Image: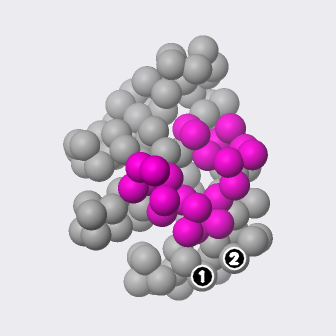
Amino acid sequence: MKAAEKLLRETKFSRRYQGYEYLVICVERVVEEDRRLCALIKEVYQPVADKYHVTYKAVERDIRTARDKAWGSGGKEVIERISGGEFYEPPTVGELIEILAEYLKKNT
């Protein structure tokens, strides 16, 4: 199992959502090159969208759906632990990708 997948499972993400697969790829792309965060749509979402023949908006929406389900299933506590912060609402998709990528870079 890839490190990104293992982290997502720990963070309570379910493979039942298409956003899970999208998020794995997005996180891996940012781990490879963190400057991609500066052009999130062009450098992160669009390559995933092209691979799955969907729009970048669909990629972001599906990740958001998976995030919301994970958040309600105990993922909030894990995200807070790995980020070192406290959240009153779920992070944006871009923030989530950044949090997960930074954690993987430091811990793998």
Residue 36 is situated, as x and y percent measured from the top left of the image, at: 30, 40
Can residue 84 be seen in the rendering of this structure?
yes
Q: Mark 1 points at which residue?
A: 77
93 left or right of 28 in image: right
**How many residues crowd mark 1 within 10 Å: few (<14), some (14–19), many (20+)?**
some
Which amino acid type is marked by label 1? Answer: Glu
Vertical placement of residue 60 versus 46, above or below? below
Distance in Å between CA atoms under marks 1 and 2: 6 Å
Q: What element carries label 1?
A: helix
**How many residues crowd mark 2 within 10 Å: few (<14), some (14–19), many (20+)?**
some
Residue 104 is situated, as x and y percent measured from the top left of the image, at: 33, 62
Q: State the residue at coordinates (25%, 43%).
A: 32
Q: Is mark 2 on a helix, strand or loop?
A: helix
Residue 33 is situated, as x and y percent measured from the top left of the image, at: 23, 43
40 left or right of 60 in image: left
Which amino acid type is marked by label 2? Answer: Gly
Query: Residue 55: within the magenta?
Result: no
- The image quadrant where one finds the C terminus is bottom left
Q: Which of 95 and 17 is in front in this view?
A: 17
Q: Mark 2 points at which residue?
A: 74
Vertical placement of residue 107 versus 5, above or below? below
Q: State the residue at coordinates (39%, 55%).
A: 3
Contact? badges 1 and 2 (CB < 8 Å): yes
Q: Which of 70 and 5 is in front in this view?
A: 5
Q: What stretch is highlighted in magenta?
A: 1-22
